[in-house]
Image (tube, rainbow, N blue to C red):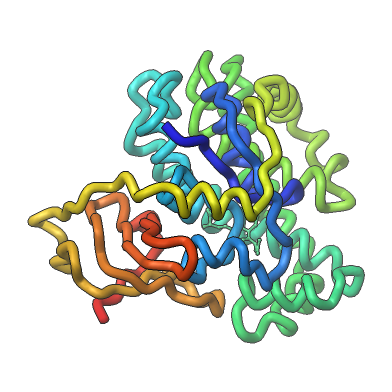
């Protein structure tokens, strides 16, 4: 199998989630460092427009969004499983809480508390992405509303702490898994990027000792790769995804349809267009041809993404 390549940057919490999953699986992988703000021409050459972090590449297959990445990692490298002890199914639902409402509040906390200290281009990019077209107003509101936002995060971190306070080593028991990776990245973000984060977290003793256990797992073994080499690897490979669809598909998606795929929330992002290659309940994959690279298959999760038939 070609190498697992993660396009990421060190400060990205969502990438940290995937790095923890790579650690749980004990994998060796290649790391391509991408810019923190657009333009990201080497990344979008592979994705066809998707610009978020992280993106996973395996040959000419490109996996957008951590939900899709984690699922593919579990499919290709089933041992150890991301949902040990038969926790599959609802454990994915937990990710919709941590990555959705909880992450949104933590972003407001981090951006709102930084206020004017944020570099202008970063504030503009992340403000638009997470707070919508009225992001400047949203940032001011977040700053004025910090005590409320902290109270919201505190309650939810309390749930995680409670889960661990019963003596469990990890969220599901003795073995680490998906709920650990998705909870950890939010805690990691709060600790590292909010000045009051460490003091805030000191209330949660069980959570703090669990953080150490997650850190001990590490990130697997990574070696650097240049974006040029990653593109050359894609150019030399063919997508490994077979054509397929599902007769119960509510949108009646079938291979060969011209579609566009975009996150279902308005972050002002560019849709990815292509020919549908594969669709089921969990994923949608489109084929596209990129100048100088050839055919690529770009994968997205179904939940949280809108597929539009063109
Ligand atoms: N739903 C996406 C969210 C990814 C996301 O928002 N990542 C942040 C970085 S932690 C991002 O893309 N920020 C803008 C950027 O890196 O350009 C996922 O789970 O992968």
Quadrant of picture, ligand 1: bottom right
Q: Give the image quarter of residue 114.
A: bottom right
Front residue of 298/70: it is 298
Quarter of the figure with the C terminus: bottom left
Q: Is residue 123 above or below residue 176?
A: below
Q: What residue appears at the point 53 percent right and 14 percent down from the top-left corner? A: 174
Residue 309 relative to residue 141: left or right? left
Front residue of 292/258: it is 292
Front residue of 66/103: it is 66
Residue 238, position as x, y percentages in the image? 36, 49
Front residue of 193/283: it is 283
Q: Give the image quarter of residue 214.
A: top right
Residue 161, position as x, y percentages in the image? 64, 31
Count of residue discs: 0
Residue 134 relative to residue 247: left or right? right
Q: Is residue 261 above or below residue 237?
A: below
Residue 49 in sight in this render = yes
Quarter of the figure with the N terminus: top left
Name, please, the residue furthest toward the left: 247
Q: Is residue 48 above or below residue 88?
A: below
Residue 301, position as x, y percentages in the image? 38, 54
Residue 2 relative to residue 31: left or right? left
Q: Is residue 301 above or below residue 176?
A: below
Q: What residue appears at the point 61 percent right and 56 percent down from the top-left corner? A: 53
Q: What residue appears at the point 32 percent right and 57 percent down from the top-left corner? A: 285
Residue 213, position as x, y percentages in the image? 69, 20
């Amino acid at each position: 199998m070609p190498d697992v390549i993660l396009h990421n940057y060190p400060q990205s919490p969502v990438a940290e989630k995937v790095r923890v999953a790579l650690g749980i699986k004990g994998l060796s992988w290649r790391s391509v460092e991408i810019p923190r703000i657009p333009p990201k021409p080497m990344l979008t050459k592979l994705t066809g427009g998707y610009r978020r972090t992280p993106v996973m590449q395996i040959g000419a297959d490109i996996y957008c969004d951590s939900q899709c990445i984690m699922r593919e990692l579990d499919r290709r490298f089933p041992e150890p499983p991301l949902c040990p002890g038969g926790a599959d199914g609802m454990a994915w639902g937990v990710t919709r809480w941590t990555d959705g409402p909880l992450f949104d509040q933590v972003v407001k906390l981090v951006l709102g508390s930084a206020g004017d200290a944020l570099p202008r281009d970063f504030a503009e990019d992340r403000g638009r992405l997470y707070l919508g077209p009225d992001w400047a107003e949203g940032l001011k509101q977040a700053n004025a509303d910090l005590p409320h936002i902290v109270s919201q995060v505190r309650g939810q971190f309390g749930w995680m702490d409670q889960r661990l306070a019963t003596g469990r080593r990890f969220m599901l028991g003795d073995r680490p898994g998906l709920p650990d990776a998705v909870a950890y990245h939010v805690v990691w973000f709060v600790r590292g990027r909010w000045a009051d984060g460490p003091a805030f977290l000191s209330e949660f003793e069980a959570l703090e000792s669990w953080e150490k256990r997650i850190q001990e797992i590490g990130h697997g073994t990574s070696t650097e790769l240049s974006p040029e080499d990653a593109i050359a690897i894609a150019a030399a490979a063919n997508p490994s995804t077979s054509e397929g669809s599902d007769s119960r598909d509510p949108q009646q998606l079938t291979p060969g349809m011209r579609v566009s795929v975009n996150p279902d929330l308005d972050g002002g992002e560019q849709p990815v267009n292509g020919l549908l290659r594969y669709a089921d309940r969990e994923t949608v994959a489109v084929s596209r041809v990129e100048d100088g690279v050839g055919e690529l298959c770009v994968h997205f999760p179904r939940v949280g993404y809108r597929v539009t038939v063109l």
